[in-house]
Amino acid sequence: MANKRTYQFGKSQLTLEFSSITTSKAQVLVSSDDYYLSMGGGVSASILNAGGNVIALDAAKKVPAALGDVVVTTAGKLPAQYIFHAVTIGPDDSVMLPKETIRQTTKRCMQMLDTLQLDSIAFPTIGAGIAGFTYEDVAVQMAEVITEDLQKRQKPVYVTIYLFDRLGRKKEIDYLQFFEEFAARVPRIANQAVAAHTPMDPVKQPTAIDDGSETDDQIRMRRLNNLRKLIGSLEDKRFELEARLIELINSGEEEDITELRRKLDENQELRLGYLNELKSLSQKDSSYSTQAQASIKRPVSVFVSSSYKDLIGHRTAVKDQIMRRDMLFRGMETFGADPSRVTPAIKIVDEVRKANVYIGIFGVRYGYIDQATGLSMTELEFNEAETSGKPMFLYVIRDDAPVKVSDIEPDPAGKAKLDSLKSRMRKDYVVYM
């Protein structure tokens, strides 16, 4: 039994192949995914598993995306040059119809071949997995867009559509017969069929992750994305520290080398912790949303995060209100001495993780910067609260608020990081000024 069939369009070819897209040697692999590019099931999970976590880390820098978008990332360990992430699952308020989504993402993928000067691309049946589009809609819409594109091309392009049923309900013959059915419906698709008979190899079925309700999906996608951002940030800092270490080794400055190695160890401990959490979240059904909802209903402890010098009065007022409501206050004032050999960054991440609710107060100072991560303690606290999905209450000082000149962040780099953090919060959250 043949497992693929090829059709000629001038110098270009369109091949239908019953196999996993991860076996393709094309320059581009297309992944069908949600607007957070969580790569949590079906084709996208198979690509992530084959290409490695570097794909997800790259994708995390480019979300959330809009329904119908195509996002370009590295292909990791795969032989392809790029992954095109076709966004087929949008937020609940998305209004694009399945047919429009298929046509738009397919068309954009073909257009981007020209932009990147590429000549081969491998598609899945876009949206026929987790997105739930019908195979008929997917087949007809992709056929019309791709064949129209190929007929206009002067230079040869090689397109493969990988037909794969993750639920195991179809066989290769079902797909080929179906292809001939819509080939008749779209006559221009098959100028000439090129024989391409190969033995049918068994293909391992990818396992879809059942994320539960829609609300659970959104919580899980956001958490995956935030974890990848944190890991990416730590990776960047690790490269910076390692480059500096090489310089010091060549210069023979032993004291500085010892300190730099300590910072690298701290960076590694944080990264491994986040990577372990990411692996666990990617492989198992997430019950986190239930835990998060329970913490909202019965908050026991509240972590208060802020810089100190410019916000002493604010912290005192908030602490007083927390204690008046019979809640437990957690913050830098309560850390005390710790006999264990734990770094401040790891300590504060653990303290935020223990709390049920996070309150962030952001004034005019960025605060002490942890050299192992390149981030202030305040931003590390914010990142951990965001990543773990805790209830977050954010307060940002008004631009016209009276402040002491001596309280304003004196370091230009710190000021830039503070402005970036505030901008990110205003974009992603409802903050109180």
Image (cartoon, grey):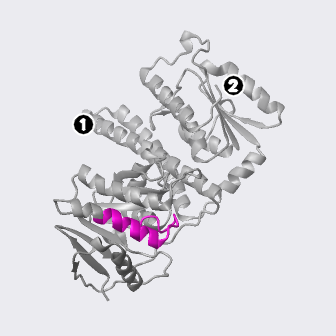
> Which quadrant: the C terminus?
top right
| Crowd band around label 2 with a 10 angstrom C-alpha radius: few (<14), some (14–19), many (20+) | some
Q: For this rendering, which residue is in front, 209 or 189?
A: 189
Residue visible at 67% across and 45% down?
A: 354
**Residue 265 shows up from this direction:** no
Q: Left or right? Give the position of 322 relative to 75.
A: right
Q: Secondary structure at mark 1?
A: helix
Q: Residues within 10 Å of mark 1 (few under 14, many from 20)?
A: few
Dot 2 lies on which element? Answer: helix
227, 255: nearer the viewer? 227
Residue 67 x/y as whole percent: 48, 52
Left or right for 317, reference 270 = right
Q: Is residue 141 magenta?
A: yes
Depth check, mark 2 against mark 1: the one in front is 2
104 vs 420: above or below: below
The percent position of residue 58, horizontal first and vertical second, equals 39, 49
Report which residue position mark 2 lands on: 315
Q: Indicate which disc residue 128 carries.
A: none
Q: Is residue 159 visible?
A: yes
Q: Which mark is residue 250?
A: 1
Q: Write down the quadrant of residue 190 in the picture.
A: bottom left
Asked if the stretch drawn in magenta spans residue 366, the answer is: no
Residue at horizontal 65 percent and vertical 28 percent from the top: 432
Q: Position of residue 312 (x, y in %)?
A: 66, 20
Q: Amino acid at mark 1?
A: Asn
- The magenta stretch spans which residues? 125-147
